[in-house]
Image (cartoon, rainbow, N blue to C red):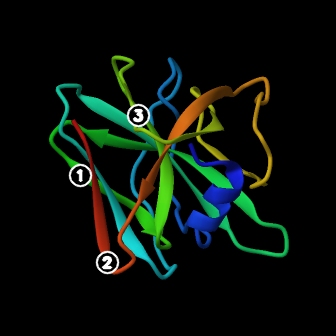
Amino acid sequence: MLNRLALSILLATCLQVSAFAQGPGPDGGPGGGAGGGATGFALIFCNKSKDPVAFVAIGSRVVSANDSTRFQGWWQVSQGQCLQVGTVPSPGFIFYARSSSGIVWSGKTSFAGCVDFVDRFDVTLPTATDIKECAANQKLVQYTLVEVNPNQKTFTMNLN
């Protein structure tokens, strides 16, 4: 399993996103797409599941004097639809996704991070931080690491 340092090496620069809305909790109705701007690849999520809605949160590294990881959510992806959530720097990203019925998509390599199930969130934490607990309004979850070929201009993550 990769450690936080490996994550900081894998995630190259800041994720450029905007226009996301509330979370999948009882009071949240997550929102739409995102902008772009960073060099890298267009990140698209497709809801190919039987659930009417998939909620997506993503993370990527912010390169600065103090390396950090930016966690952002939520994007709502309707059943049978695809949504570009932003431009992600090569060679990868992390994500947390769950359906409206509570199904969580996961992969082999994961990293702890926080989500807010009631509202949108945009949190930047030091990459070296070993996250063990979250703010009162957030929950600790496992984000899945996805590595992408650095030559790709578009990457589609299918939620089946």
Q: What kind of residue is marked 3?
A: Ser
Q: Can residue 20 be seen by looking at this rendering?
A: no
Residue at horizontal 39 percent and vertical 18 percent from the top = 102
What residue is shown with label 2? 153
Task: Judge left or right: residue 100 versus residue 118.
Answer: left
Quarter the N terminus occupies = top right
Label 2 and label 1: CA atoms lie apart by: 16 Å
Q: Amino acid at mark 1?
A: Cys
Q: Relative to 69, say whether 23 is above or below.
A: above
Residue that badge 3 annotates: 106
- Horizontal and vertical percent position of residue 59: 57, 53
Label located before the other in sequence (2 or 3): 3
Q: In this rendered view, identify the residue nearer to me: 134 or 145.
A: 145
Helix, strand or loop under label 1: strand
- Residue 58 in view (yes/no): yes
C-alpha distance separating marks 3 and 1: 18 Å
Can you say whether 53 is above or below 86 in the image? above
Of mark 3 and mark 1, the one earlier in the sequence is 1
- In the picture of the structure, the residue carrying the numbered disc 1 is 82
Front residue (pair 90, 81): 90
Mark closer to the observer (2, 1): 2
Q: Residue at x 76, y 30 (%)?
A: 134
Residue 81 placement (x, y as % from top left):
19, 46
Mark 3 vs mark 1, foreground winner is: 3
In the image: residue 137, left or right of residue 99: right
Callout 1 environment at 10 Å: few (<14), some (14 to 19), or many (20+)? some
Q: Name the residue located 31 percent from the left edge and 42 percent from the top edge.
A: 77
Type of the residue with mark 2: Lys
Q: Residue furthest right?
A: 65
Relative to residue 118, is residue 89 depicted above or below? below
Circle number at residue 148: none
Q: Position of residue 135 (x, y in %)?
A: 79, 30
